[in-house]
Amino acid sequence: MSPQSSAQGGDGPEVQSWEPERVCRRIPRSEALLSRGFLRCRPEKWFPGIGTLWTPVMHSFGCEVAITDIRASLSRPPLGGSAFVASIAGEPMLLALDEESAAALVGEMIPGSDESAAAVVTEYMIRKLFHSLVVTWAGPEMGQASFVGVADGSADLGVASVRVGMTVNTTPLVAWFGLGQRMVEALDGLWRRQIQSSGRNPVAASQARVEVAQLGVPPQTLSDYLKPGTVIDLEVKASEAVTVRVGGKAWMPGRMVNVEGFFGCEITPGVLSGPVVPEGTTRLSVELGSVQMEANQLPEFGQSGSVLITQTPVGDTVDLVINQEVVAKARLCVYEGRFAIEVL
């Protein structure tokens, strides 16, 4: 759509307000900061050979065990089934099975056992699990590790957890590891360094710019597009979908989120798509904000689920950018289900 005068003047299209405070998913800053490290990590990578320790143990009970899912989370583990406390470098760690999983484990290993036998078997398996983790850990020195015993109601549940889904024979169960702040920070940094070392750095330190849409503007009409009061249909569906650009090139797809009052961009899976700016026109980018990053940070920010945090407060004001320079401000609004802007 060609630029038109504002609806306030009576001649332009009628636009509706866009409310990012309502439509954008809210993410705590703590979660955003851990989104490219701890929350993306694959803990099993740091325990090579753990299967060789567990296979003989399970075979002695006539059982086969398989890991089905491992996921880091900022939720705390449940406390109500079988829970035990260990210590690593002086910080508590909780190892727990919910009630259903604890019963399933004992039922597969010793069918028909009474309550006292079940408690002994569960503690033995948790002790064995903790020992296996300590022995097979392939990361930096973790400090002194010890198994403390059964957790009581005052047990420290930690600040985050790793949830491990598994099957014993064909029966599913879940084990939880409650982690303290120091352990979470250590795993976060370890994963980010690992991702950085395995990635390529095609550009130097650069800005990642969060783009809502782009326009191909004929140079001779650029002044019309940037005139205050002008309303322009961006011809893209009004949604949280955005594109992250690095070094002037489209880099990753994402979705806009609200990080405690500031715009963020959560990297999403998939491929980039969108119209190409026609040759001979000036690319006018509509952007929410930018994030400064070093070249070695690109691989960690490029993981699906990572969150980039801008310094732009959540609102309806956007930047109009040419050649990575802000040339005007505009109000982002909605026109017939599509995004539109009103130049300020």
Image: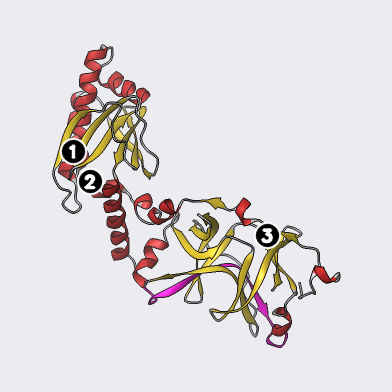
Identify the residue at horizontal 24%, vertical 24% (top origin): 122
The earlier-in-sequence mark between 3 and 1 is 1
In the structure shown, which secondary structural element does the residue marked by tag 3 occupy?
strand
Crowd class of label 1 (few under 14; some 14 to 19; many from 20; radius 10 Å): some
For label 1, the residue is 132
Q: Is residue 297 magenta?
A: no
Identify the residue at horizontal 34%, vertical 43% (top origin): 159
For label 2, the residue is 47
- Structural distance between the alpha carbons of marks 3 and 2: 45 Å
- Structural distance between the alpha carbons of marks 1 and 2: 9 Å
- The answer to whether mark 1 and mark 2 are in CB contact below 8 A is yes
Q: Position of residue 145 (x, y in %)?
A: 15, 41
Up the image or down, 40 lies above or below 147; here it is below
- The answer to whether mark 3 and mark 2 are in CB contact below 8 A is no
Identify the residue at horizontal 49%, vertical 51% (top origin): 27
In the structure shown, which secondary structural element does the residue marked by tag 1 occupy?
helix
Q: Position of residue 322 (x, y in %)?
A: 59, 80
Q: Is residue 206 magenta?
A: yes
Three-letter residue code for mark 2: Phe
